[in-house]
Amino acid sequence: MTSTVIIQAAGKTDVGTVRANNEDNFGFDTRCGVFVVCDGMGGQAAGERASKIAVDTVLGYFRKAPGDDSAEVLGTSFEGVSERANSLARAVQLANQAILQEAARNVSEAGMGSTIVAVLEEGRFFSIAHVGDSRIYLVRGGAIRQLTSDHSLLMEQVRRGLLTEEEAEHSTLQNVIVRALGSDESVEPDLADHEFKGGDLLILCSDGLTRRLNDNAILEIVNRTADLEQASSELIQAAKDAGSDDNITCVLVRALSPSWRDRFFGRKRQSQSSF
């Protein structure tokens, strides 16, 4: 295993076939190694505003100048995970504060919130954080694995044995989430640390994708389509063709083992702001 990986990334969001506005937002910056997808909620344009605040806040946290502590959050330090994961948690907590502050300033935006999934990559290691029912998948060796566990009423019932996963897939309560940014003064994201293997693909997505495409359908698309931009478009189109009535967003992150030329000339980085 080499000490680092080459990161490729692409993302796309789509309003879908039913909604009038897009409450999803995404962003990434491969120079900082951070990738984010958010799905907003709230009346009128409040959800769209909340998800954009969350994405911009997390990206801004990692883009700040070294030694700039102006955006530090006084919150819980999470044990059992790396400092990298704790840094991601602080960014998520800061996003929660920013949404609450915006809602307090504008009566029309009261009650707005957002889900979030985020990845922070460093060398061959990466950490994940999530709040809500947006998801992160890992595709490795031709197989797909969900790295997050939905903070939803249905998944709570599945975890307690009250429903089967098949029953949950057909429930009318799929949009009821039990944890979100903007709902409480403090938020506790789920955190985990992982290590890349060359060829790994991470998929960060909103539930507009996963409600209509099961794991096998997602895997089939990304396995047949090497280009990340094209794969993003095909995933979204497949969800629309399957009848998705929600906004749809995905960010794909591929880790490649560097060639001798890459190691010699250095790592090429790219960035993309939120939409």
Image (cartoon, rainbow, N blue to C red):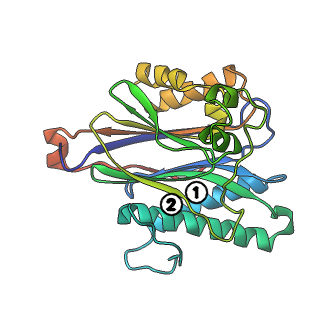
Residue 264: mark in rendering = none
Residue 59: mark in rendering = 2
**Circles 1 and 2: CB atoms closer than 8 Å:** yes
Disc 2 is placed on an element classified as helix
Q: Say how many tags the image has.
A: 2
Residue type indicated by callout 1:
Val
Q: Relative to residue 136, is residue 69 depicted above or below?
A: below
Q: Position of residue 137 (x, y in %)?
A: 47, 37
State the residue at coordinates (39%, 54%): 33
Disc 1 is placed on an element classified as helix
Q: Relative to residue 105, is residue 3 depicted above or below?
A: above
Residue type indicated by callout 2:
Leu
Q: Is residue 60 visible?
A: no
Placement of the N terminus among the 4 image quadrants: top left
- The quadrant in which residue 110 appears is bottom right
Q: CA distance from mark 1 to mark 2?
A: 6 Å
Q: Position of residue 203 (x, y in %)?
A: 48, 38
- The quadrant in which residue 152 appears is top right
Residue 55: mark in rendering = 1
Classify 10 Å Cα crowding around label 2: few (below 14), some (14-19), many (20 and above): many
State the residue at coordinates (74%, 41%): 175
Quick one: which residue is furthest to the front in this view? 161
Q: Nearer the viewer, residue 9 or 208?
A: 208
State the residue at coordinates (68%, 37%): 162
Q: Position of residue 131 (x, y in %)?
A: 59, 54
In the shown orientation, is residue 241 left or right of residue 92? right
Q: Is residue 125 visible?
A: yes
